[in-house]
Amino acid sequence: MKSVVVGTAGHIDHGKTALVKALTGIDADRLEEEKRRGITIDLGFAHLDLPGPGGELLRLGFVDVPGHERFVRNMLAGVGGIDVVLFVVAADESIKPQTREHFDICRLLSVQRGITVLTKADTVDAETLQVVRLEVEDFLRGSFLDPSTSPIVAVSSLRGAGIEELKQALVSVASQIEARDSTAIARLPVDRVFTMKGFGTVVTGTLISGTVTKDAELEVFPGGQRVRVRGVQVHGAAAERAVAGQRTALNLAGVSTGELTRGMMLAPPSLFRSAFSIDVKLSLLHSARPLKDRARVHFHAYTCESIATVNLFDGIKLDPGETAYAQLRLNVPTVLLPGDRFIIRQFSPVVTIGGGVVLDATPQAGKAKKEERLPFLQSMESGSPEQVLRARVRHRGKSGLALGAAVSETGWTREKLQAAVEVLLQNKEIVSAGDLLISSEDFQTAAQEMQLAVKTFHDANPLVAGIGKEQLRERLDLSPEAFEAVVDDLVKGAKLEVRADQVRVAGRGVVMKDEEAESKRIIETAFASAGLRVPALKDVLAGLKVDRARAQKIVTLLLRDKILVKVSEDLVFHQEALSGLRQRMAAEKAKSPRMDVARFKDLTGVTRKYAIPLLEYLDREHVTRRVGDERIVL
Ligand SMILES: Nc1nc2c(ncn2[C@@H]2O[C@H](COP(=O)(O)OP(=O)(O)O)[C@@H](O)[C@H]2O)c(=O)[nH]1
Ligand SMILES: [Mg+2]
C-alpha cells in the first residue's frame, strides 16, 4: 500500500474545495465560518483509497488549501508536505493572481508531480474551454507541469463530468511518485492542535518521513517537551502506525494543547536541535523586486513560519530571477534538514518573492568565512552521501564529527550514515576515533602538532620527564576522544610514550647535565644513608653545585618518581627508609599492636620532633590508627 499526499492549489473560488468533494465525498471546509461564508480559510482534509495499476491500494490524503490572498500563509502550512498538486484553474476565469502565486510556491517547493484541472467546465462553451486550455498550456510550458508530461483534465465538479478521468490520472501520477522514506527518521510538522473528548491532546500533520508507532516517545521542537503517542489515526481510522506520506493524527500524553501550536515539529527524542540560523540556496522570482543583503522577509517551511533576515554570502543584493547562497537568521528556531524546501515572502506588502533549499541547518558559529563556506555548501547541494559526509567531517576540523551530530545534521538513519562511513574509512579519507570521525588530513595535522608540542615541551623543560596529558590536550585544543586517538596512533607508531599520564618523545628520559646528575646522586645518597634521622632538605641543597631553582626541580623529580617521600612540610625521607620502617612496624605488631610515642622512639631511635610526623604519616598510610594517645598497629 502506497500513501501519497495530494494538495490543491489555485485562485479563490476556482472550485478547489468542490473538486475535493467531488473526488472524495468529503467537504474539507470544516470550520463554521468557512461553511457560512462559502470560502476556505484554513487547511481542510479528505482522503480516498483507489486501486493502483497493479491492483494494490493507493491511499490518497488530500490537503485542501485556501485560495484567498489573505490566507496564503495557511496555504503554505499545507503545501509543504504534499507529493502531488491538483493545480486548479477555473475555465470561466482562467489564470488569476493566486493561480500564479500558488504555482510559484509549488515550483519553489519542488513539488514532484501534478495534474492541472480546468474546473467549472460546465460554465463555458467548448470554444472558450479550448482557449483557456491553450492559455494554461502556455503558462505551464517548461515547468514541472509541462503539458507534454503532466495531464490537463477538464471537469465539472457539480455534474461529475471528467471526475473519473481525473481519478485515473491521479492513479497514474501517484503510482509514479517516489514514496517517501518510511525508514528515515520520523518528522511530523504539526498543522493542527485540538482536544478531543475522551482522548485529550491531538495533533495532526503530514508525516514527511519515517514511521510513528503507538507508544513511541517523541520530542516536540522547539519546546523540547517529551510526549508519548497514546494513539495513532491515519485517514480518520485508528492504526498501529503512521508511515511517511500519510495524513496523521496523534493522540499525545505528557503535553497540553496550550503547549503546542501549528509550526512545531515532532521527531524522536534527543536527535535534533532547533536552530536559529540556516544556510540555504535562495532563488528570487522574476516578479520580485531586488532583495537587499540583510533584508527582512517572512519565512515558511512546512507548517512553521518566522521572520528571517537574509544574509547574502556574496554581493549586496539578489536580482529578480537570480539564485545565491545565503544564511537566514530566524526569529523562531526550527528543526530543518538539508534538502528541506522553504518559501520567502516580502516583509510588506506580503507577497511571495522566492524560496529555495536548505543546505545546512546547523551552521557552526564562527565558521561564516566565505572562502570556507562556499565550497562546503556546494558539496551539500550536489554531493553524494559520501561527499556530503566527507565535507561535514572536514568542516569540523581536528575536533572531528560525532556520529550523533552527523545524524542530527543530515537526518540520515544510522544505516545510511554507516554505509557512507565505511566507504570513507576504506578510502582512508577519514579516521574513526571512538564516536568521532576525523578527516585523515586533520588527523595527520593534529599528530604533527602533537609531536611538535611534546618536543617543544622537552626543550623548555629538560628536567621534567614529559608533558601532562591534559596540559597537552588543552595546548592542542583537541576534544578528549580526538586527543586519545592521536596519542594512541603516535604511541603505536613508536613516536611517543605515555607514562603515568605524561606524554614524552619515545625513548626519551630526563636529560641531565653532568652537574645535575651529580647533584641528584648527592641528594639521593644523603637521604638514603640517613635512614630515619634525615638532614634538613635546605642544608642538603645548599651544598650542591647547581643553583636553587634547578636543585628544586631535581627534588621535584625525585618526589615524583617516589624515590623521596614528603612526610611533612619540612621532612623528606628516602623511600627505602620508610619501607624499612613499615616492615619493623609489622614485626612489632606480633609482639603487641599497641604503640605509644615512647615505644616508637625506642624502636626507631628518633627524637620527638621526627616521631610525631612519622606516626601521623603512618596513620595516613593506614599502617597505624590513632586511639587516644596511643596507636594500634594495623
Ligand atoms: N458550475 C460549477 N460550479 C462550481 C464548480 N466547482 C465549484 N463550483 C462553485 O464555485 C464556487 C467556489 O467553489 P469552491 O470549491 O469553494 O472554490 P475554492 O475557493 O477554490 O475552494 C462554489 O459556489 C461552487 O459551488 C463546477 O465544476 N461547476
Ligand atoms: Mg476552498
Image: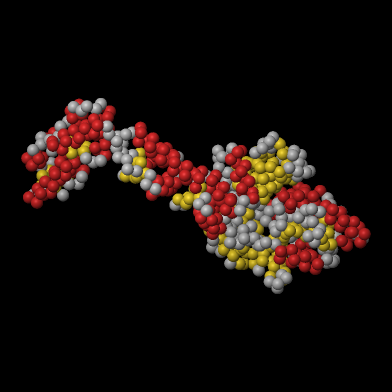
Q: Could one spot residue 505 in this view of the protein?
A: yes
| Picture layout, residue 401 above or below residue 318 | below
Quarter in which the N terminus is drawn: bottom right
Q: How is the image coloured?
A: secondary structure
Residue 558 sits in quarter: top left
- Judge by depth and name the residue closer to the eye, 543 or 537: 543
Q: Residue at x 49, y 47 (%)?
A: 440
The x, y position of residue 41, in whole percent, is 74, 53
- Judge by depth and name the residue closer to the eye, 546 or 610: 546
Q: Residue at x 55, y 49 (%)?
A: 390
The x, y position of residue 407, in whole percent, is 54, 53
Residue 159 sits in quarter: bottom right
Q: Residue at x 69, y 70 (%)?
A: 57
The x, y position of residue 538, in whole percent, is 20, 28
Q: Is residue 555 left or right of residue 629?
A: right
- Judge by depth and name the residue closer to the eye, 133 or 21: 133
Q: Could one spot residue 408 in this view of the protein?
A: no
The x, y position of residue 425, in whole percent, is 50, 54
Q: How many marks?
A: 0
| Picture layout, residue 182 above or below residue 257 | below
Q: Residue at x 88, y 62 (%)?
A: 122
Q: Is residue 340 left or right of residue 28?
A: left
